Image (cartoon, rainbow, N blue to C red):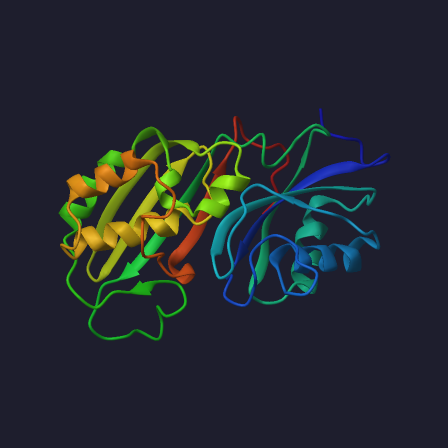
Amino acid sequence: MVADAATGARIILIIEYIGTKYHGSQYQANAPTIQGELEKALKKLTGERIRIKTASRTDAGVHARGQVVCFDTKSKLPLKPFIDGMNFHLPGDIAVKGAYKVDASFDARRRALSREYRYSIYNSPTRSPLKEGTAWRVAGKLDTAAMQKACETLIGRHDFTSFVGSEIVAKEKRTVRDIYKAEITKDGEMITFDITANSFLPHQVRNMIGCLVKVGQDKMTAAEFKQLVESRTPGPAGMTAPAEGLCLVQVNYPGPFEGETR
């Protein structure tokens, strides 16, 4: 049952953004963040001080095509004006792509079944101004078949301690995650790493791609990559891939939302 707008409503927004200028999705008092910009826009639109919740936390510099945010409001605005009004007040590198009303018990983070991320690599000896900022340029040739072979190790339930630092392990209650998809594809000079999981640890995907690139460069074998996964020792993963190549593509839920407006 969707909350009655007369007494208040819980709304989710589908957000797209370029994360280059922001210190991540989560609010920080002294730095620009996606959450901070969204909350400022909501204040201008509704007159309310609203705190939002995000479905998946993104690091500084990471982008999103399908971030989901959730909040409560007393505003009686229909969904379409929420989209148009938010986009009027938001900076040009953040946009609302859809809006829905949901049940008052809906939690954007806890209700999610899985998150899909894509990491883009521009595999070329020359730079590309058009791709700069949304892909990591790796100049030398990469063996994508070897990278895909290493990806097979990631599928299933694993303890991914090896792909995060000891400080993150200390903060996290669990380091076990379920990976449903991990795939390398190549289209000309573009290589993409698509991964879907129930959730991710901080920096996990960027550390994974850093190691996969080492496999592609013949600096690590697929067998050594597997040993790294199984070692469950904080910190040995090595190179962390740059943030600009990573994008949150989609957050998946048990069923479609009602009242979609785009």
Horizontal placement of 200 versus 6: left or right? Answer: left
Percent x, y of residue 215:
19, 51
Percent x, y of residue 171:
54, 41
> Based on the displayed image, in which of its 4 quarters is residue 127 positioned?
bottom left
- Residue at image point 58% right, 58% down: 95
Horizontal placement of 132 versus 72: left or right? Answer: left
Nearest the viewer among 231 and 96 is 231
Q: Is residue 63 above or below residue 158?
A: below
Q: Is residue 104 above or below residue 14?
A: above
- Residue at image point 65% right, 60% down: 87
Percent x, y of residue 25:
58, 54
Q: Is residue 174 above or below residue 205?
A: above
Q: Is residue 25 above or below residue 259?
A: below
Nearest the viewer among 32 and 95 is 32
- Residue at image point 21% right, 68% down: 139
Q: What is the residue that sits farthest to the top in this orientation?
A: 1
Nearest the viewer among 212 and 262 is 212
> Based on the displayed image, in which of its 4 quarters is residue 30 positioned?
bottom right
In the rendered image, the quadrant that contains the N terminus is top right
Q: How many marks on residues?
A: 0
Percent x, y of residue 111:
58, 29
Horizontal placement of 171 versus 153: left or right? Answer: right
